[in-house]
C-alpha cells in the first residue's frame, strides 16, 4: 500500500510545484500575420506568424503552446507548436485555392489562454477537379452503389454529387467534410440514372469543375411483362374472361423468382409469388369493365403493363328517384331527379320526361350508371308525374329501358297568418262569445290553425279550403283577456308560422245594485239626515254609483274598491219624500237598483197641543187681568204667601187682577222649555234661578194707561218644586202687534222639533190658544171674570190638576 501512495504523492508535489511556478504568467495580446505577395496565386508560399505578448513574474522559463486554425470560430486545427519563444510560424509551401479563407491562432501559457483576431487570405486560381469512383459498376435494379468523390484541396470542403439524365445534371446531395473525400450511397431503381459526377466547393465560395462522368451498367432481371386478354375482341356479358400476366428472364438471372400481380382499377385481384405467370379467369359482367395492370416485382425492380377491358352489357331498367325524402318539394327549393341503372355498357344515354309532354325535359350521355336532372326554384308548374329512359348500344343493337313513374308534389309553406276579431272592440265583458278569425293566405292545404292565449294553447282547427279558421272563445273571467296569437302549419314539418298578437281586455259587468238605509229604517223626520248605501256584488272597477229620487239625479260617487257608495240626504221638506234608486255603472254596463221609499214622520200634532195650551193660558191671563182691575179699585193688591202652595200636585194659585179686555183668542209666545216631566215632577227644583215664566202682554185698544212706556202687564208663573204662581200686574200698553203669552225658560232646555214658526234670536214658538172656560172642580172659583189656567205639561191635558 505504501508503495502506491509514495509515487502518487511525489507526482502530486511535482504538479503543484509546476502550477506554482506558472502562476505568475499573464498573456496581454495575441496576433496573427501572414507573409506573402499581395496577389497570392495558386502555388505561392504563405508563412503565418502567431505572436504573443506575455508578462512573467518569475525567472523560470515557461512553455508556450501555439495552435493554428483555419476558420473564424473553432475552425480546422492546422498545426500545434510548443515553444518557449514569444512567436511561432505555420508555413504553406504551395498554396491552393482551398487555402483561401480566415485564419487565427490561440496561445496557451500556464493557465492562461487567449485567441487572436482572424485574418483573411485569398488565393487566386482554380479549384482542382475531384475524382469520382463508383462501386460496383455492374448492378441490377434493387442493388446499392457507393459514390466516392476525392479532392487534393484543403478541407473543410463541400462535395456535391450529380446524376445525369441526358445532358441535364440533377443535384443529388451535398456532403460537407473535414476530410479530402466524401461518400454517397444510392439504391438503383428501374428509373435510376446511369451517369454520375461530383464537384468540390472550397472556402465556401470557390467551386471546382465537375469530375469525369462515371457510367454504371444496370441490367434487368426480367423482360417487360405481357398482359393477355381472352377473348381479344369485343367482350359481352356472360363470356368467359381470362386475363394472363407473364414475364421472361435473362440468362444471367435465371434464379430470380419475381412477384406477379394482376390489378384492376388500382385494386389487386391476383397475386402470385416465385413464378413468371399470373392468370385471372371470370364470367364477364359489367363490373369487370375497367383498367387492368400486369405488375412484375423483384427487390427494387418493378415493371408493369396496362390494358383497358370493356364488357358490353345492355342497360338494366333505370330507377327514377327524387333526392328529397317523400317526393315532397318546397316551393322555391331545388329538385334533383336521379335516373340510375344497375348495369350497362358505357356510354349510357339518359332522358327525363314529364307525362304531360312527349319531349324530353333533359338528355345526357355519360360513362356512368347515374344521371341527375336538376330543377332550380321549383314552383307549382313543376308539380306532376315524371319518368326517365336509359339506353346504350350493345352488339350493334340499341337497348332502351324506361323507369317507373314518380309523382312530385310541390308543397307551399304557410304564410304568416293574421288574427282578428269579429268586432273592433278591445274591451269585452264576461259572458260574451268572441269569434277570432285566423287566416294564412298561402300554403298547401290542409292547414291546421292553433289558438294561443298568453302562450298557452287553447285548441286547434283544420281547414281544407282557403277560408279562415273561426275560433269561438267564451269569456268566463278576466283571465280570458290578454294576448291572443294563432299558429298556421301544414304537412311541411318545422315550417309553421305565428301571427302577430291581438290584445283585448275582459271586464266584469256590474250586477244589480242594492240600495239600503244605514239603520235599515225608511222612517225619517224632517230635518234629519238619512244615510243610504248602494253596492253591487260584481263589476270591474272603477264603478260609478248615482243616486236618483223620482228619476232625478242627486249625487254620484266613484270607487275603485268593492265597497258601498255612501249617500247622505238631509230631509228638509216633505218634498224630499218619494222613491229613491241608485245606478251602478262601469265601462261596459250599468244597472239600477230596486226603489226605496222614505217615510217622513209628521210632527205637527205637537204644534196643535202647544197652541191649545197657549190659548188656555191667554184666556186665564185675561180673566186674571179683569180680577186685578176690580181689586185695584177696592183694595190694595194682596200678595199670596209662597208657602201656601208647597205641596206638590196642588192646584195652580192665582191673584185676581183687573180685566183689560175681552177677547176669545190671544197669541201666546212659548219659548224653549225643559222637558215637562222635569218641571212638574220637581226635577232640578233646587236650582237657583228665577224659574220659567209666562209674560202676558196687555192687548191694545183698552185705553188704560196707554202712555206707559213698558212692556205691559204680565204674570210670572214660577215652577219651583212643581208649584206654579200667578202675578197680576197693572194695566199697560203693549208695543207689540197683539196680545200674546210669552212662555220662556231661563235655563237651557232640551231642543224640541216643531213645524211651528220660530223667532230667529231665541227660537220662541207661536201658538194660537182658544180661551175657553176652564173646568176644575177642585179649584175655588174667584169672583168676577177671573180665568183659571192650569197647564200640566207632562200630560198636556187642560182642566186637570
Image: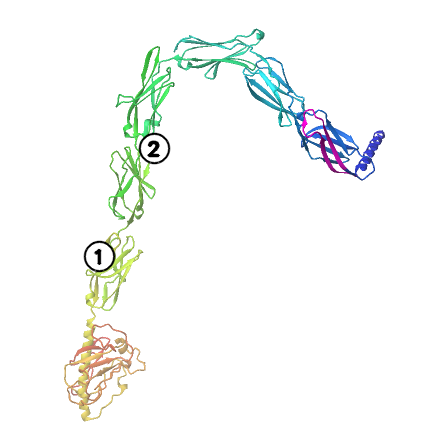
Who's the residue at 18% across and 93% down the image? 634
Alpha carbon of mark 2 to alpha carbon of mark 1: how far?
Answer: 61 Å
Q: Secondary structure at mark 2?
A: loop
Residue 441 is left or right of residue 261, and the answer is left
Quadrant of the snapshot with the N terminus = top right
Q: Position of residue 624 (x, y in %)?
A: 19, 86
Q: Position of residue 411 (x, y in %)?
A: 30, 31
Examine the residues drawn in magenta and state their main secondary structure.
Answer: strand
Work out whether residue 741 can be spotted: yes
Does residue 458 sit above or below 662 in this rendering? above
Q: How many marks?
A: 2
Q: Which residue is mark 2?
A: 493
Q: Which residue is mark 1?
A: 594
Work out whether residue 187 can be spotted: no
Q: What span is colored magenta in the figure?
A: 24-53
Q: To which quarter of the image does residue 403 belong? A: top left
Q: Position of residue 707 (x, y in %)?
A: 19, 90
Who's the residue at 74% across and 33% down the image? 50
Residue 689 is left or right of residue 226, and the answer is left
Amino acid at each position: 500500500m505504501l508503495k502506491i501512495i509514495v509515487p502518487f504523492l511525489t507526482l502530486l508535489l511535482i504538479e503543484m510545484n509546476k502550477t506554482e511556478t506558472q502562476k505568475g504568467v499573464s498573456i496581454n495580446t495575441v496576433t496573427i500575420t501572414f507573409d506573402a505577395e499581395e496577389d497570392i496565386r495558386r502555388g505561392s508560399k504563405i508563412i503565418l506568424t502567431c505572436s504573443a505578448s506575455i508578462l512573467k513574474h518569475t525567472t523560470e522559463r515557461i512553455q508556450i503552446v501555439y495552435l493554428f486554425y483555419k476558420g473564424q470560430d473553432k475552425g480546422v486545427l492546422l498545426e500545434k507548436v510548443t515553444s518557449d519563444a514569444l512567436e511561432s510560424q505555420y508555413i504553406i509551401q504551395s498554396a491552393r485555392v482551398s487555402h483561401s479563407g480566415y485564419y487565427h491562432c490561440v496561445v496557451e501559457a500556464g493557465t492562461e489562454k487567449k485567441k487572436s483576431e482572424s485574418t483573411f487570405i485569398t488565393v487566386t486560381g482554380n479549384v482542382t477537379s475531384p475524382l469520382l469512383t463508383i462501386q460496383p459498376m455492374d448492378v441490377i435494379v434493387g442493388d446499392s452503389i457507393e459514390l466516392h468523390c476525392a479532392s487534393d484541396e484543403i478541407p473543410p470542403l463541400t462535395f456535391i454529387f450529380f446524376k445525369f439524365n441526358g445532358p441535364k445534371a440533377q443535384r443529388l446531395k451535398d456532403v460537407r467534410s473535414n476530410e479530402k473525400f466524401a461518400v454517397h450511397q444510392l439504391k438503383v431503381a428501374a428509373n435510376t440514372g446511369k451517369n454520375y459526377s461530383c464537384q468540390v466547393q472550397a472556402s465556401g465560395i470557390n467551386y471546382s469543375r465537375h469530375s469525369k462522368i462515371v457510367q454504371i451498367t444496370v441490367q434487368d432481371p426480367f423482360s417487360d411483362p405481357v398482359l393477355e386478354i381472352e377473348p381479344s375482341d369485343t367482350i359481352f356479358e356472360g363470356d368467359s374472361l381470362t386475363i394472363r400476366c407473364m414475364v421472361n428472364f435473362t440468362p444471367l438471372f435465371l434464379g430470380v423468382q419475381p412477384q406477379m400481380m394482376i390489378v384492376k382499377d388500382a385494386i389487386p385481384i391476383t397475386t402470385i409469388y416465385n413464378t413468371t405467370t399470373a392468370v385471372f379467369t371470370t364470367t364477364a359482367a359489367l363490373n369487370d369493365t375497367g383498367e387492368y395492370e400486369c405488375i412484375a416485382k423483384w427487390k427494387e425492380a418493378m415493371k408493369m403493363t396496362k390494358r383497358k377491358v370493356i364488357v358490353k352489357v345492355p342497360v338494366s331498367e333505370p330507377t327514377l328517384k327524387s333526392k328529397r325524402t317523400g317526393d315532397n318539394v318546397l316551393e322555391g327549393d331545388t329538385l334533383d331527379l336521379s335516373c340510375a341503372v344497375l348495369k350497362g355498357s358505357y356510354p349510357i344515354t339518359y332522358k327525363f320526361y314529364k307525362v304531360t309532354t312527349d319531349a324530353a325535359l333533359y338528355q345526357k350521355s355519360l360513362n356512368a350508371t347515374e344521371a341527375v336532372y336538376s330543377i332550380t326554384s321549383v314552383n307549382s308548374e313543376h308539380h306532376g308525374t315524371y319518368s326517365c329512359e336509359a339506353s346504350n348500344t350493345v352488339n350493334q343493337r340499341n337497348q332502351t329501358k324506361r323507369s317507373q313513374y314518380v309523382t312530385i308534389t310541390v308543397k307551399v309553406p304557410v304564410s304568416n297568418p293574421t288574427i282578428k276579431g269579429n268586432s273592433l272592440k278591445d274591451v269585452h265583458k264576461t259572458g260574451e262569445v268572441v269569434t277570432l278569425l285566423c287566416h294564412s293566405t298561402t300554403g298547401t292545404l290542409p292547414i291546421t290553425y292553433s289558438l294561443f292565449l298568453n302562450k298557452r294553447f287553447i285548441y286547434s282547427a283544420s281547414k281544407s279550403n282557403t277560408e279562415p279558421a273561426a275560433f269561438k272563445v267564451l269569456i268566463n273571467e278576466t283571465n280570458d283577456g290578454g294576448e291572443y296569437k294563432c299558429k298556421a302549419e301544414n304537412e311541411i314539418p318545422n315550417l309553421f308560422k305565428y301571427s302577430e298578437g291581438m290584445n283585448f281586455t275582459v271586464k266584469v259587468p256590474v250586477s244589480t245594485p242594492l240600495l239600503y238605509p244605514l239603520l235599515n229604517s225608511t222612517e225619517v223626520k224632517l230635518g234629519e239626515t238619512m244615510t243610504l248605501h248602494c253596492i253591487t256584488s260584481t263589476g270591474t272597477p272603477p264603478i260609478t254609483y248615482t243616486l236618483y229620487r223620482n228619476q232625478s239625479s242627486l249625487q254620484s260617487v266613484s270607487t275603485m274598491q268593492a265597497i258601498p257608495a255612501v249617500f247622505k240626504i238631509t230631509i228638509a221638506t216633505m218634498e224630499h219624500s218619494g222613491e229613491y234608486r241608485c245606478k251602478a255603472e262601469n265601462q261596459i254596463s250599468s244597472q239600477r237598483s230596486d226603489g226605496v221609499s222614505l217615510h217622513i214622520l209628521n210632527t205637527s200634532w205637537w204644534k196643535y197641543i202647544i197652541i191649545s195650551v197657549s190659548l188656555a193660558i191667554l184666556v186665564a191671563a185675561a180673566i186674571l187681568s179683569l180680577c186685578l182691575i176690580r181689586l185695584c179699585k177696592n183694595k190694595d193688591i194682596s200678595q199670596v204667601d209662597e208657602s201656601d202652595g208647597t205641596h206638590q200636585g196642588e192646584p195652580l194659585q192665582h191673584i185676581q187682577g183687573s180685566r183689560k179686555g175681552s177677547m176669545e183668542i190671544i197669541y201666546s209666545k212659548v219659548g224653549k222649555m225643559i222637558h215637562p216631566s222635569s218641571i212638574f215632577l220637581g226635577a232640578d227644583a233646587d236650582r237657583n234661578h228665577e224659574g220659567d215664566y209666562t209674560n202676558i202682554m196687555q192687548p191694545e185698544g183698552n185705553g188704560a194707561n196707554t202712555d206707559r212706556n213698558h212692556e205691559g202687564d204680565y204674570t210670572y208663573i214660577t215652577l219651583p218644586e212643581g208649584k206654579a204662581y200667578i202675578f197680576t200686574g197693572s194695566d199697560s200698553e203693549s208695543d207689540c202687534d197683539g196680545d200674546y203669552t210669552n212662555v220662556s225658560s231661563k235655563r237651557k232646555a232640551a231642543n224640541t222639533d216643531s213645524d211651528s214658526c220660530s223667532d230667529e234670536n231665541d227660537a220662541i214658538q207661536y201658538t194660537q190658544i182658544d180661551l175657553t172656560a176652564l173646568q176644575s172642580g177642585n179649584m175655588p172659583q174667584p169672583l168676577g171674570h177671573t180665568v183659571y189656567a192650569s197647564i200640566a205639561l207632562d200630560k198636556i191635558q187642560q182642566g186637570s190638576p
